[in-house]
Image: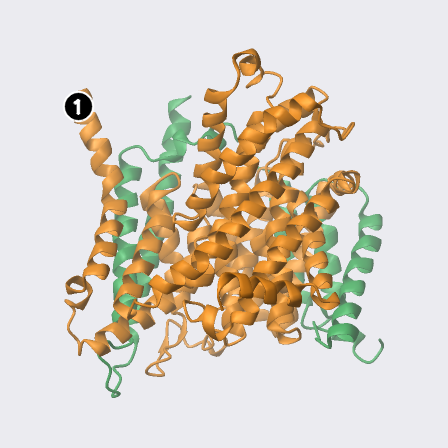
Chain colours: A green, B orange
Amino acid sequence: MAPSSGTAERGADLAASLFVTLLGLLCIWQAWAIPVTPLYAQVGPKFMPYLIGGLVTLVGLGLVGTALRGGWSASLEEVREAPPVNWRALGLVGAGLVANLALIDTLGFVFAATAQFVLVAMGFGSRHPLRDLAIGLAVTLGAFLAFDKLLGVNIGAGILDGIL
Amino acid sequence: MDVWSGLAFGFGNALTLTNLGWALLGCFLGTAIGVLPGIGPALTIALLLPITFQVSATGAFILFCGVFYGAMYGGSTTSILLNTPGESGSIITALEGAKMARNGRAGPALVTAAIGSFVAGTIGTLGISFLGPIVVELALQLGPAEYFALMILCFVTVSAVLGGSALRGLASLGLGLTIGLIGIDLQTGQPRLTFGIPELLDGVDVVLVAVALFAVGETLYLAWRHVEGRQEVREVGRLMMSKEDWKRSIGPWLRGAGLGFPFGVMPTGGSEMPTMLSYYAERKLVKPEHRHEFGTTGAIEGVAGPEAANNAAAAGILVPMLTLGLPTSATAAIMLSAFQSYGIQPGPMLFTTQGELVWTLIASLYIANIMLVVLNLPLVGLWARILKIPTPQLYAGILVFATIGTYGISNSVVDLMLLYGIGIIAMFMRRFDFPTAPVVIGMILGPMAEQAMRQALTISQGDWTTFLTRPVSLCILILALIGLVGPKLWALAARRRAA
C-alpha cells in the first residue's frame, strides 16, 4: 500500500475518534444543563447523563490514541479493497433525501417520495427515469391508499388532500 | 402453568384461524425480506411496529416471530444463490453454499439449509419451552440490584466481547445510551438532552433509529461504494438431496443446533460465533474422502452445520428476551420495545402475568418452523425471482418505506431530518467498522438499566455498596469486568509469553 493512502486513513480514523469524543462532551454539557430538581430522588436525573457522557468521552479518547498509533482502517479488508468513492451515486441519493425533506410538507408524501424514488434509482445506475417515475408513483400511491383507507393512518396527503 | 399444560393451551390458541394467518403472513414476509439483500428482520419488525396500535398483542408477536424465524430461512437462500450474506449469521453459509451453487449443486445446498433450519429451529424452540420456565424460577429471586448488574453484563457482552474492537463496540453502545437519554426523565419530569426542541420531549422513537441505521445508513453506504454492474444469481436446479447428502447432513444439523442454542441463550448476542465454531467443527469432523470439497467445490457439511447453528442461536436469543427482558440482538431489542408499547413489562413476571401470550407465542414458533420449511422448499423459485429485483429500484423502494416508517407515523419533518442525520452517522459507522446492533440495544436497555439502578438505590437508601454486597450482583459484575478486560489481559499475557 502506498504510504500516502495510509496517512489518509489515519487522518480519517482520527476524525472519527474526535467525533466520538465530541459526542461524549456534548452529553456531559447537556447533563450539566439539566436544571437541579427540587423533587427528592436518591439519584437525580443528571447522574446517568454524566456517567454516559464520561464513558463516551473516555472511549473517544481511547480511539484517538488508537488513531494516533496508526488507526484501524488500514487493516480493514473492506476499506483496503473498496472501490473509489462514487460521488455521482452518493450525490444523487443525497439529492433524493433533500427533495423528500423539501417537498413532503407541501406536496405530500406521494410526490415527495416519488421524486426521491427517481433520484435514488438514478443514483444506483438506472437509465430509465420515466419508467422509475411510473414505478415510484405506483408504489407510493399504493402505500398511501393502503395506509389511508385500510389502517386509517394519514401519512401526509399534501395536495392530494380532498382529491382521493 | 407448567410446560405441558402451557404448550397444550398455547397450541389450542395458536391453531385458531386468525393466529395461523398471522404466522403465515409473518413467515412469508420474513422469508421475503430475508432473501432481499440489505434489509433484515430488525428493520422489518421496526417498520411493522405501528400495527401494535391496531392488532392484539398475541397476533402482533406471532407476526414478529414469524418474521424473525423467516428471515433466517430467507437469508440462507441469498447466501447460496448470490454469495451475498444478508446478515452476519449467514456469512459462513455463503462460504460453502455459494461454492456448491457455482458447481451446480445449489439445489442440495438450499434443501440442507432449509431442513437444517427446521431441525435446529425445532430443537431451539423445545429449548425455549423447557428452559424458559426454569430461568424464570431463578429470575424471580433477583432484585433491582441484580437486574442492573445483569444489564451491565449484557452491555459488555454485546459491545465489547464480540466484534472487531471493544472500543468501537463501546462507542456504538454509548451512542445508543445517549439517544436513550433524550426526552423527559420519568422519575423527576426533567427534560434531558432535548436542546429545547419540543419534538424531542417524548424521546427518540426506536423505529426511527432502526430505520436510520439499517435502511438509510446502509443505502448511503452502498451508494458511496457503488460500482455499476449486476450480480449474477445462480440457477436453483433440482431440489433434491441424494441419500449420501442426507447421511452427510444429519450429523452437522444436530451438532450445529447443539452449538447454536447455548450461544443464543447466553447474553453474548449474535450468531457469528456459533456459526463459525460449527464450520470449523464440521471441517475437522468430515470424512477424509470429502475433506477436499471444503473451500473448493463446496461441502454440504459446511452449509448444514452453520445454518443449523444460526437458527438455533436465533431461537436461543428469545430465552433471555422472554424470561429476563434482556435483548441480546437488535431484533430482540425492537421486539422488547413492542412489548413496552403494549404496556407489558418483559421479564420473569411475563410467564405468570402474560402466560397465555407467552405459550401461544411458543406454540406459534413450532408452527412457524413447519410453515417455513413448507414455504421454502417448493417456493424457492419464487424467492430466487425476488433476488432479481434490480438494485436501483430495490434501494429506492427501501427509502420510500423508510419515509413511511418515520414521517408517515408522526407527520413531522423534524423526525425526517433526525432520520437522515442518524443515517449519515450510520454510513460512517459502516465505513469505520463500528457495529450497529449495540446502538439499538443501548437505546432500549439504557433507560431500563437506569430505572433498575435507581430502584436498587432507593431500596438501599442511597447506599452504593448494595451492588457489591449482594452476592449475585457482585458475581455478575465480576463476570462483566472479566468480559471487558479479560481479552486484553489474555492478549498481553500471550504476547509476553511469545516475547
Residue A73, given in percent of the width and then of the height, sits at 40, 35
Residue A81, given in percent of the width and then of the height, sits at 51, 27
Instruction: Residue at 54%, 75% (x, y): give it.
Output: B342
Name the side, left or right, on which A43 lies relative to B65: left
For label 1, the crowd category at 10 Å Cα-Cα, with few meaning under 14, some 14 to 19 and many 20 or more, is few
Q: How many marks?
A: 1
Q: Nearer the viewer, residue A4 or B118?
A: B118
Name the side, left or right, on which B479 lies relative to B71: left
Instruction: Residue at 69%, 19% (x, y): give it.
Output: B103
Residue A141, given in percent of the width and then of the height, sits at 80, 64
Name the side, left or right, on which B125 lies relative to A74: right
Image quadrant where one finds the C terminus of chain B: top left
Where residue A103 sits, quadrant-wise, is bottom right
Q: Nearer the viewer, residue B160 or B404?
A: B160
Where residue B11 sits, quadrant-wise, is bottom right
Q: Is residue B24 visible to the viewer in this orientation of the structure?
A: yes
* Mark 1 secondary-structure assignment: helix
Instruction: Residue at 48%, 59% (x, y): give it.
Output: B333
Residue at the spot of label 1: B497
Can you say whether B430 is above or below B104 in the image? Answer: below
Can you say whether B418 is above or below B384 in the image? Answer: below
Q: Nearer the viewer, residue B119 or B77?
A: B119
Chain hosting mark 1: B
Type of residue at label 1?
Answer: Arg
Residue B109, given in percent of the width and then of the height, sits at 66, 29
Q: Is residue B226 visible to the viewer in this orientation of the structure?
A: no
